[in-house]
Image (spheres, grey):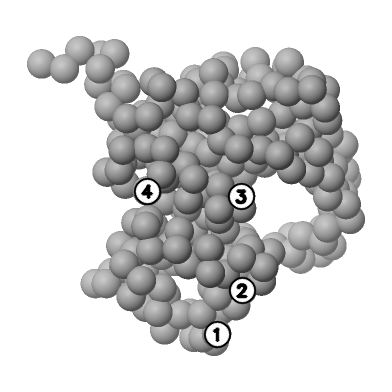
Amino acid sequence: MIGPKLKEEAMSLLIVGSVALDSIKTPYGGHSDILGGSAVHASMSASFHSPVNLVGVVGDDFPQEHVDFLSLRGIDVSGLEIVEGKTFRWAGYYENDMNQAHTLDTQLNVFADFVPKIPVKYQESKYLFLGNIHPVLQLDVLNKLSRPELVAMDTMNFWIDSQKEALSEVVKNVDILFINDAELRQYTNESNLINAARTVLNQGLKYVIVKKGEHGSMIIGDNLFFACPAFL
């Protein structure tokens, strides 16, 4: 019988990505320096279902209350580096269409020199999520690990524009791609989302999860199509 500790380690999910301080304005209000970043959002969501190990970097200005908050969610933050300098910051706003973010300012700060360091205890992780970071860093993480049983990744339009070759190499080595509808069309040059997803599946993926903001998502596989409304 597997003991509770071994069972927890076997089910742990490793998440590598950005940890940020975001400043956001909407028609309904705004806040400055709130906890954000791809690794944070993914870790928070996953923490409802699985133990989570987070790898990222922040500056020495990062509030301890945010580290404590993540820990209280059961997220292992021993892979969160704190280095001298300022934390990655993003500022933007939303208009009436809350699916469309408008960037006002991006300050990479310590994130500009981020090279993921995977603690030894994380290196046998069976499940891996590569957050929205430079594709070269995503490949670097894959090369540092024994092949996990399941690997998922996220990306964005910036990497599709500037690093498509490296991004395609990552896609060939993962099982699940998270991507929004506009980015999927951009990546494949296909206007029809189903055809676009099939184009990506041909690169070796098991599933493509198409994010559609407030309208939910579409999960597409070789023999699977499932639309998931946001209210589910």
Of labels 3 and 1, earlier in sequence is 3
Say which amino acid is labelled 2.
Ala
Closer to the eye: label 3 or 1: 3
Label 1 environment density (alpha carbons within 10 Å; few <14, some 14–19, many ≥20): few
Identify residue for label 2. Answer: 182
Residues at discs 2 and 1 in contact (Cβ within 8 Å): no
Chain-order first, disc 2 or disc 3: 3
Q: Tell me where residue 100 appears, x and y as whole percent.
A: 74, 64
Q: Are marks 2 and 3 in contact (CB under 8 Å)?
A: no
Label 1 to label 4: alpha-carbon separation: 25 Å
Q: Quadrant of the N terminus?
A: top left
- Sequence-wise, the earlier of marks 4 and 2 is 4
Residue assigned mark 4: 151
Q: Which amino acid lies under the numbered mark 3 shown in the image of this protein?
A: Ile
Question: Which residue sits at x=37%, y=56%?
Answer: 174
Amino acid of disc 1: Asn
**Element carrying mark 4:** strand
Is 107 positioned to the left or the right of 14 in the image?
right
Q: Which one is in front, 54 or 115?
A: 115
Q: Position of residue 154 (x, y in %)?
A: 53, 55
**Label 3, label 1: how far apart the Cα atoms are:** 22 Å
In percent of width and height, residue 96 lies at: 81, 64
Q: Nearer the viewer, residue 131 or 116?
A: 116
Task: Read off the residue under disc 1.
Answer: 189
Mark 1 falls on what kind of element?
loop
Please, what is the three-letter code of the amino acid marked with disc 4?
Val
Could you tell me how far apart the alpha carbons at marks 4 and 2 are, in whole angstroms?
A: 23 Å
CA distance for labels 3 and 4: 15 Å
Residue behind mark 3: 133
